Image (tube, rainbow, N blue to C red):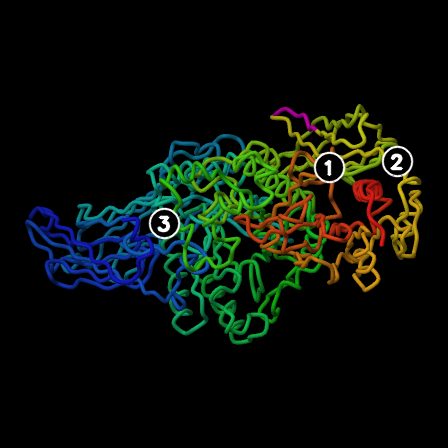
């Protein structure tokens, strides 16, 4: 069957089933399908009983007229078209993941009474402590004109009193019952009044079982069962409110793809383990991405207690058909999951996929017709369900929304400062995220701001993945994976033919370093959200790797990556954050830092906040209110040396309280900058950089002569070429704004300066004597804060190039270098140094040390003179 994973077209299913005559007596026979992708036609004993078009939601056909006692043959034809542009399909196929087709949820044959309850919608009202129950019934031909409808809500024993609303432990554990009369009308409403009900929340997910009995002349003719939770969700003043209380959303994105089984969970307990794992990592919300959540997943979310953000699958193009099918799926999704207390947010679209993202479509930013359509869709969902929030277009341009969310991918420390600036812009310029505000009622600043996609890549265990598949998975070489960073095929060859095989012992060594890079990055991304007022939550991408996209906290096999325990402390309801002003400091200088205790619980917390760094320490008692932060600033007046030229130590912080202590560490690199540069040779430089070199004792010249030992240049002109040809050493630097000009032997590729999904796939590594003692192993980290390049040298040649620092993206694609030396026959060495050292030399210890070591290395070499 592996060869059929990417098959599209028509598939036929055939099944025989024996039916007892007693099951048919006085009953209707319904064929129920959980979900089938995409167009479904069903025959029973050769009689067509129904047709459905949708890939994600349940449907049923009445087969009463076709089914017979004894053996019956059920035939199902499923057609999934090659072209998915106009139909909701999520991330199936180009440019994402493996296609999914056919029956992927359960199929059942049910025998039901002709008079029956079709659906039940329970709407909690926490202001009144009551629940309105809307019962939709179907009256059979023999039913009495009036039936008695008995609605009963019974608290589940498990954890019910933990969810009490008043804190005195007296939550009502008795059943609440209401009766009404069902007449010819299809819909009947009743109200269930509660006395001190248990409220549903993540830490105490109290559930109520609801049953509806239809009674005809004293006989129960039908019994319907479901469950619900007493829960409200809204917002005010930029904050989310769960049951009227402020809550920080600590979310993670989950896409529900699995090795070999795609949409189908591989085991019966898969969803239970996923929810348990997410809660164990400190999350209180899961965003189910661009396809309706599996019903069994929602049952686990309801039971264990985790919030869910749901959205339909997206089409690709904006057409009349795609609009119709997406809005129909939205309506069906709301209907299916209305009683699920875990679901608190509906999204309509994601990043304009299907409503302006396609290259041939006008974007939502400028298309008034699309804006009107989206505003109408928002209102329609709000009318169907007033108990949840609605996000119109997750992550990109909004028109009217209850969640002002942003998708911003950064890697830290590479773009740490830019990420912090972006967060502040989100807070203070919320309206910039709206294509128009003409549909907005009220102030956009009241709508909660959420960073609903962020994350960084970190390669999982490739050996374990191959063991599972018995070799390379089929998705390694999908034809539509044309971007090299997305295409795993050939990854071993790329490892061996780049410097990676010389820097890392083996592929597992690279994986360990890259996972560390992922943790360092997401730690900073999340912490900077949590220490800021005005950002109401976040959704990290993602819970697990999915096929080639390895930015999960777990790998694709749902095995933890190496840093999960550490991340759980970062993401805990109670955490502590250490923020040094700089991550690299010169011995003898001062170091200032902030410590912030983040309390996302419902209760105030008092404890002892302590810190230590290189023999210095401090402790104090602090109290942090519920859903609040407490920040203190501290300073080490003089950082002691480390008895090394350069070394890294941790700034450690702990918040001790009655529960588990909250701890964190942040690396600070200390450099002994007492270097004598006066005897290192004559160095050519210009502008402010020349002044900085001179202030550090370097002998600087503005002339390229035989007496010049090394030249720092930002532009390669004829004089520089002549100097290099005569044996001079050239170091090509970026301009003061980080731009690399052309010229010289290398081609430079620009790197994203701002938010970029591409930037989050990158990995910098080193094996350079110039960086001895600087980095924590081969991986670059916080020591290069503020120096990470805006471009790298490419078209590298292993025969002539000594790569001191390398860079790859994704599946070891797009190799480049911010520090590489090319040897040239008959000429001097050419150094590409793209780190942003120009403005940092003399003030940034690592920039200073790196340039000084370059000067020492190359001015000490004897070179021929022209």
Residue bearing mark 2: 675
Q: Earlier in the sequence, mark 1 or mark 3?
A: 3
Q: Residues within 10 Å of mark 1 (few under 14, many from 20)?
A: few
- Helix, strand or loop for disc 3: loop
Query: Looking at the image, is mark 2 or mark 3 earlier in the sequence?
Result: 3
Q: Is residue 383 above or below residue 855?
A: below
Residue 657 within the segment the image draws in magenta? yes
- Nearer to us: label 2 or label 1: 1
Alpha-carbon span between mark 2 and mark 3: 61 Å
Along the horizontal axis of the image, is 195 left or right of 224? Answer: right
Q: Which residue is mark 1?
A: 769
Q: Which mark is residue 812?
A: none
Q: Which residues are magenta?
A: 654-659
Instruction: Name the secondary structure under disc 1.
Output: helix
Question: For residue 261: magenta?
Answer: no
| 277 relative to 406, above or below | above
Where residue 780 sits: x, y (%)?
67, 41
Q: Is residue 219 left or right of residue 243?
A: left
Instruction: Count neighbours of disc 2 (C-alpha within 10 A) and say few if under 14, some if 14 to 19, many if 20 or more.
Output: few
Around disc 3, counting alpha carbons within 10 Å, would you say few (fewer than 14), some (14 to 19), or many (20 or more)?
A: some
Q: Which residue is mark 3?
A: 263
Disc 2 versus disc 1: distance between alpha carbons? 17 Å
- Is the residue 647 above or below the residue 82 in the image? above
Secondary-structure class at tag 2: loop
Image coords of residue 665 (percent x, y): 69, 32
């Amino acid at each position: 069957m592996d060869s059929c994973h990417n098959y599209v077209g028509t598939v036929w299913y055939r099944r025989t089933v024996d039916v007892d005559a007693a099951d048919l007596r006085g009953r209707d026979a319904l064929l129920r399908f959980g979900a089938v992708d995409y167009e479904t036609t069903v025959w029973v004993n050769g009689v067509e009983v129904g047709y459905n078009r949708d890939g994600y939601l349940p449907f049923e056909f009445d087969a009463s007229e076709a089914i017979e006692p004894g053996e019956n043959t059920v035939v199902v034809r499923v057609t999934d078209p090659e072209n998915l542009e106009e139909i909701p399909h999520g991330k199936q196929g180009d440019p994402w993941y493996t296609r999914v087709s056919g029956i992927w949820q359960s199929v059942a044959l049910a025998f039901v009474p002709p008079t029956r309850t079709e659906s039940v919608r329970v709407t909690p009202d926490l202001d009144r402590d009551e629940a309105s129950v809307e019962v939709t019934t179907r009256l059979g031909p023999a039913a009495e004109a009036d039936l008695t409808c008995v609605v009963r809500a019974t608290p589940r024993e498990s954890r019910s009193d933990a969810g009490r609303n008043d804190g005195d432990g007296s939550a009502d554990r008795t059943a609440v019952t209401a009766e009404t009369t069902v007449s010819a009308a299809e819909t009947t409403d009743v109200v269930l009044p509660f006395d001190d009900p248990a409220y549903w929340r993540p830490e105490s997910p109290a559930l109520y079982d609801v049953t509806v009995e239809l009674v005809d002349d004293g006989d129960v003719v039908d019994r319907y069962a479901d469950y619900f939770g007493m829960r409200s969700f809204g917002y005010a003043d930029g904050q989310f409110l769960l049951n009227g209380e402020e809550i920080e959303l600590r979310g993670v994105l989950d896409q529900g793809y699995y090795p070999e089984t795609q949409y189908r969970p591989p085991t019966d307990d898969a969803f239970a383990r996923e929810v348990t794992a997410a809660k164990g990592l400190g999350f209180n919300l899961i965003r189910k991405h661009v396809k309706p959540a599996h019903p069994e997943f929602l049952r686990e979310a309801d039971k264990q207690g985790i919030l869910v953000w749901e959205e339909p699958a997206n089409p690709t193009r904006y057409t009349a058909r795609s609009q119709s099918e997406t809005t129909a799926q939205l309506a069906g999704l709301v209907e299916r999951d209305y009683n699920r207390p875990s679901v608190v947010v509906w999204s309509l679209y994601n990043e304009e996929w299907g409503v302006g993202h396609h290259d041939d479509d006008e974007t939502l930013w400028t298309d008034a017709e699309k804006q009107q359509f989206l505003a109408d869709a928002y209102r329609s969902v709000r009318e169907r369900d007033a108990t949840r929030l609605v996000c119109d277009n997750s992550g990109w341009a909004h028109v009217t929304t209850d969640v002002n969310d942003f998708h911003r991918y950064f890697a830290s420390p590479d773009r740490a400062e830019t990420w912090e600036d972006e967060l502040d812009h989100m807070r203070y310029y919320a309206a910039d995220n709206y294509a128009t505000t003409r549909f907005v009622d009220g102030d956009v600043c009241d709508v909660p701001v959420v960073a609903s996609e962020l994350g960084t890549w970190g390669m999982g265990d490739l050996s374990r993945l191959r063991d599972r598949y018995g070799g390379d998975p089929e998705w390694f070489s999908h034809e539509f994976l044309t971007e090299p960073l997305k295409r795993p095929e050939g990854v071993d060859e790329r490892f061996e033919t780049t410097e990676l095989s010389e820097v890392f012992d083996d592929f597992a060594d690279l994986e360990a370093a890259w996972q560390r890079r992922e943790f360092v990055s997401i730690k900073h991304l999340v912490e900077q959200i949590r220490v800021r007022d005005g950002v109401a939550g976040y959704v990290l991408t993602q819970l697990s790797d999915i096929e080639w996209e390895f930015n999960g906290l777990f790998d694709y096999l749902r095995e933890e990556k190496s840093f999960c325990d550490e991340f759980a402390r970062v993401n805990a309801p109670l955490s502590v954050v250490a923020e040094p002003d700089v991550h690299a400091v010169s011995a003898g200088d001062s170091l200032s830092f902030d410590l912030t205790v983040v309390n996302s619980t419902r209760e105030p917390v008092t404890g002892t906040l302590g810190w230590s760094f290189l023999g210095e320490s401090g402790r104090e008692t602090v109290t942090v209110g519920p859903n609040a932060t407490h920040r203190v600033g501290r300073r080490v007046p003089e950082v002691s040396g480390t008895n090394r030229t350069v070394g890294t130590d941790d700034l450690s912080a702990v918040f001790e309280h009655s529960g588990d202590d909250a701890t964190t560490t942040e690396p600070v690199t200390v450099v002994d900058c007492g270097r004598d540069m006066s005897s290192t040779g004559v160095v050519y430089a210009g502008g402010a950089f020349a002044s900085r070199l001179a202030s550090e004792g370097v002998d600087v010249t503005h002339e390229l002569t035989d007496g010049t030992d090394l030249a720092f240049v930002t532009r390669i002109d004829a004089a520089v070429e002549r100097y290099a040809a005569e044996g001079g050493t050239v170091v090509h630097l970026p301009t003061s704004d980080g731009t690399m000009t052309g010229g010289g032997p290398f081609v430079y590729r620009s790197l994203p300066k701002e938010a970029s999904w591409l930037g989050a796939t990158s990995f910098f590594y080193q094996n350079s004597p110039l960086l001895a003692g600087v980095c924590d192993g081969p991986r670059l980290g916080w020591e290069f804060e503020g120096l990470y390049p805006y471009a790298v040298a490419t078209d590298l040649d292993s025969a002539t190039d000594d790569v001191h620092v390398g860079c790859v993206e994704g599946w070891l694609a797009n190799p480049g270098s911010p520090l590489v030396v090319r040897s040239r026959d008959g000429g001097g060495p050419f150094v590409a140094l793209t780190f942003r050292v120009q403005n940092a030399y003399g003030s940034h210890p690592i920039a200073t040390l790196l340039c000084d070591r370059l000067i020492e290395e190359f001015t000490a070499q004897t070179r021929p003179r022209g």
